[in-house]
Amino acid sequence: MDSTGVHVDVVTSQPIKDKEPKKKFVSVEGERDWSTGPYACFPDFPSCCRGFCCIPCMMSEISQRLGEWMCFPFFMPGGGNVLRTRVRTMGGIKGTACDDCIMMCFCGACAVWQMQRELDEMGIPKV
């Protein structure tokens, strides 16, 4: 109390902002396998032939189904890899970006077909 009888608190330091909590990272590690193998397109032979004969058409379709510009895979280097990684993470499928890249490089037609079938399994409508 001071001489007038009023209680006075003396501030001896400035308030300190609490440390911000650490950011949490969400794992994108999938929990399941692809619904079909990469070479399982043969039961649907007409679509299989279309996939092998016109990979760019199927990649455009996949891009549109994912809400991207239809020419995205052609104007972005590695666009096919990006689409495959996006399908995999959306579906909670096991794998890595390296796996996606290897599959697109060495068996692009099969990888594109596998993505198309996976989007069908997930119920993502064709555009």
Image: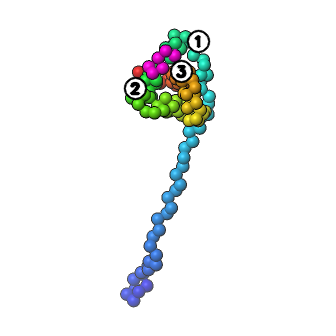
> Which quadrant: the C terminus?
top left
Are there few (<14), some (14-19), or many (20+) residues within 10 Å of tag 2?
A: some
Q: How is the image coloured?
A: rainbow
Are there few (<14), some (14-19), or many (20+) residues within 10 Å of tag 3?
A: many
Task: Name the residue that disc number 3 marks.
Answer: 109
Residue segment shown in magenta: 52-57
User: Where residue 65 appears, x then y in whole percent?
Assistant: 44, 25
Front position in the image: 29 or 7: 29
* Disc number for residue 33: none
Q: Most prominent secondary structure in the magenta stretch? A: helix
Q: Amino acid at mark 2?
A: Met
Residue 97 vertical position relative to residue 19 in the rendered view, above or below: above
Horizontal relation, residue 121 to residue 77: left or right = right
Residue found at the very far bottom of the displayed protein:
3
User: Where residue 81 appears, x then y in whole percent?
Assistant: 51, 31
Task: Name the residue that disc number 1 marks.
Answer: 43
Q: Secondary structure at mark 2?
A: loop
Q: CA distance from mark 1 to mark 3?
A: 15 Å
User: Where residue 87 appears, x then y in whole percent?
Assistant: 51, 30
Residue 123 vertical position relative to residue 24 in the rendered view, above or below: above
Residue 20 vertical position relative to residue 8 in the rendered view, above or below: above
Front position in the image: 31 or 57: 57
| Residue under the point 39% across and 89% down | 3
| Sequence-wise first label, 2 or 1 | 1
Q: Amino acid at mark 1?
A: Pro
Report the mark closest to the observer, 2 or 3: 3
Task: Name the residue that disc number 2 marks.
Answer: 70
